[in-house]
Image (tube, grey):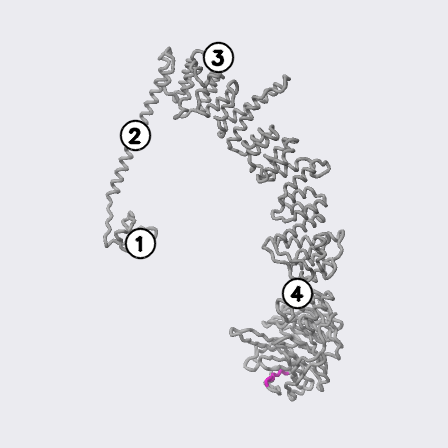
Amino acid sequence: MHDAYEAIPVLEKLPLQIESIFAYDANLVVGTRQGHLLMYSVTPGTTQRWDVSLVCSNKNFSRRPIIQVAVVPEHQIIISLSDNVMSVHDLTAFNIPLLSTMTQTKGATAFDLDIKRTKTLTGETAVTVRLVVAVRRRLQLYYWKGRQFHQLRDDLSLPDVPRALTWCLEAIAVAFKQEYWLVKLDGEQKELFATGRSQEPLITKLGSEGEQLALAHDKETIFVDSQGNASCSYTLKWDEQPITLAFHKPYLIAVLSKTIEVKTAEPQTTVQILNLDKPRLITVSSSTKGESQVFVASGSHIWCLHDLPINQQIPQLLLEKKFALALKLVDVWNEAEDAKAQMCKHIQHLHAIHLFCSKEYGEAMSIFIQHNTDLPFVIGLYPDMVPEEYRSRLQYPYPPPTLTGAELEIALQALVNFLLEMRHRLSANDGGSGSDNTQRFNKTPTLKSRNEKLQIIDTTLLKCYLKTNDSLVRPLLRMPDSQVSAVEGERVLRHAHRYQDLVLLLRTRGHHQRALNLLLRHARKPESPLAGHHHTVTYLQQLGPQHIDLIFEYGGWVLQSHPEDGLKIFIGDRSVGGEMEQLPRPRVLSFLKKTEKSLIVPYLEHVIGEWGDTMPLLHNELIHEYRDQILAPMQSSDPAAVEEEKGRRRAIQEKLLKFLNESEHYTAATLLVHFPYDTLHRERAVLLGRLGQHQQALVLYVHTLGDIDAALQYCQTHYMPTGSGSEVYLILLKLLVSPADAFRSPAASPIKHPPPAPPDVEGVLKLLHKYLHCIDLSQALKVLPDDVALGLLQPFIQTSLSHASAARREKQISRGLTQSLRLQTNEELVECQKLKIVLSEYTYCAVCRKRFTKHSAFAWYPNGDIVHFSCQNQR
């Protein structure tokens, strides 16, 4: 317990019996058993006694006890209950004269006032007063106006005579002898619960408006809201049944038979016990100017329970670790809002550290999150989470506990939740600086940079995951915005032998050379999780073209020891993504030539076939590689090996021929000079065809290869109605009719051909029959031998003439249609030119209704309307 109040005598040994008291501002109203009505002015003085002076009194008001009294300072009236009748007194005069006696309240046993103060538009305070009076088994309701009370509504009937009552917003809480009720102004009545064994039930407002009530039930106090529902799941217990109760925020004060007991409902704790001589009455001043005071009275004495300054109570509570109560005192502290906020945060942090030391880690972290506590301050509560030299600079009000085993794991999980929430806040915005309250406990600078905070959070999360759930380490490192410190992360991962995660950390931080050196060292250690070359391959696949030199430096040993897997560094596979497609392909090709030539063809086939590369350099290189493999000398004399090698070369030759026919991106002129004259004739013919040298190509097909079908296929491929391709069939015809001409060709001179055969007249006639539409008959007749019978040529000549006549007729028809269309168009033009548009000074725009000037541009509509050119879009 601590000292919240000190009892200061106000009136001692009053010669009259005190029956009722009421306080407001610095005034104390006393009603006596002898019927006197007294008002005193109370001025704070020393701790032993305050100055008290009688302001006014009415000693002839009544001969009966004044059992209840109340004051409305704004209207300068006193309301009293004496001799079972309500009376109203004027407070402006010294003798407190009687204004009126409310005769209609005869038989009254209790009353209560509802005073509402509201601000008007002019800034003044409007005060409305409602009065409820218990008269036998009825409630009478009044309102104050014109210096008297008027009836508010019809009386409310009750099942019993009220012992106590109080306003509760738009309802009235009523205490009967055996139960509590809630009576609403609309007439609805609700039974709450029994009063217990007590014959004197109590109702106390918790606040000025009566939103919550405290109802006595023997030695307990039950809390209900304005609807009569329980507002708390607990009750407040007293040492004995209270005589009366009062609420002085945040305390509930009970007058017991010999003592005054001070408690708080939340948290439920006894704050103080004061010993006074036979206390009976208690009231809390309704202050409109400053802090309120509590007055307690016995039959002849009155004390003021003067509350000690809040700034004296709070340190006592913090020493006793009563943080919740300290926070409640801050709420009622009469200080600037900034000072209250700082004190509140300070208390919250002390509370959080105390909770942490009490092994309530989750609750502690919730408070740290709520107040955005500085990260190192929280992390420093845990062992091995911050550098020792840094941790030694942190100062805590309570020594952090030593955490080991399962207890450490539970505490670390709470830290993880804290860090994740703080990270979420930083991701949502730039984040604020750490809480100023941590500066009370440590001398380290507060972190300002958002990236610094993220780095501390992520590095600490890494340490936590290694100790609690290592499966979360890799997702943390893979996060796009992960900020794990490379230096500290490498240290803890090496200590934990998490080399795969270490490689991932170094890669995400851009330390590729260190990561590759680590992979290279561990690749030759069979017991290492990084043993083998696959980890290096996967790593290099993730690097982009900006790291091409590193790829060449650390990919060489993989290419030499495992060529097929090494090739995946540059082309990848379906299971691993990467940036291989972005690598500079000419440089990769050059590197493969120097390192492992056997991979050139697979690489080029993938780049061209899978990625669709159209770079002529790569297409030319692939053709060169195919040619060199086909022409390479045999390495073995074993017949079986020779046959196998021949089969392999035939397959390569088929791929070469197919590639030459399909690719459009190689340069035939530079390739042709590298192809021999004595072999690869089909391939050479394809290159000649790309260069437009059709005669030389057809010579190879007809006379070197003797493949007329291939020659015809060549003609079908290269024939075009115009240009050099229009004569391919005629060239073939010449080669079939006059073979000797082919051998006189300079381009064909390096090739040795067999002696020329006689002209194939039958083949020539078949060619003419099938491809006559592609051959100029006049040129063909010049080529044919003179000994060919004219009768054999008759069908071809007739067909050619028929085709020529048909073509001539089509051109004549087309010419006639064109001439007709020209005449029709000319007629339409003449009709349009006949139209005349006359503008005069009486011509107006159909839109804006303004005249046209000689410089006006205009638009004409088919219906005859003429508008300004600028007005046409507004029509």
- Kindly check if marks 4 and 3 are in contact, taking CB atoms under 8 A apart as contact: no
In the image, is 480 to the left or to the right of 272?
left
Instruction: Tell me: 206 left or right of 793.
Output: right
- Which residue in the protein does label 4 denote? 344
Q: CA gap, disc 1 to disc 3?
A: 92 Å
Callouts 1 and 4 close, C-beta under 8 Å: no
- Badge 2 or badge 4: first in the primary sequence: 4
Q: Distance between the Cα atoms at labels 4 and 3? A: 111 Å
Where is residue 74, by image quadrant?
bottom right
Helix, strand or loop status at disc 3: loop
Q: Three-letter amino acid code at disc 1?
A: Val
Q: Nearer the viewer, mark 4 or mark 3?
A: 3
Residue labelled with disc 3: 754
Amino acid at the residue labelled 3? Pro
Sort mark 2 into few (<14), some (14-19) or many (20+) by Cα contacts within 10 Å: few
- Residue 785, how many percent across, how many down? 38, 12
Dot 2 amino acid type = Arg
Amino acid type, label 4: Cys
- Residue 278 percent across, percent down from the top left: 75, 79
- In terms of secondary structure, where does tag 2 sit? helix
Q: Which secondary structure class fits the magenta region best? A: strand
Closer to viewer: mark 3 or mark 2: 3
Q: Is residue 137 above or below residue 873?
A: below
Where is residue 462? Give x, y as percent: 68, 49
Say which of marks 1 and 4 sits in front: 4
The residue beneath circle 2 is 815
Instruction: Based on the picture, tell me whether residue 778 belongs to the magenta stretch.
Output: no
Q: Which residues are magenta?
A: 85-92
* Circle 4: element type: helix
Residue 474's disc is: none
Instruction: Tell me the residue that label 1 is attached to.
Output: 847
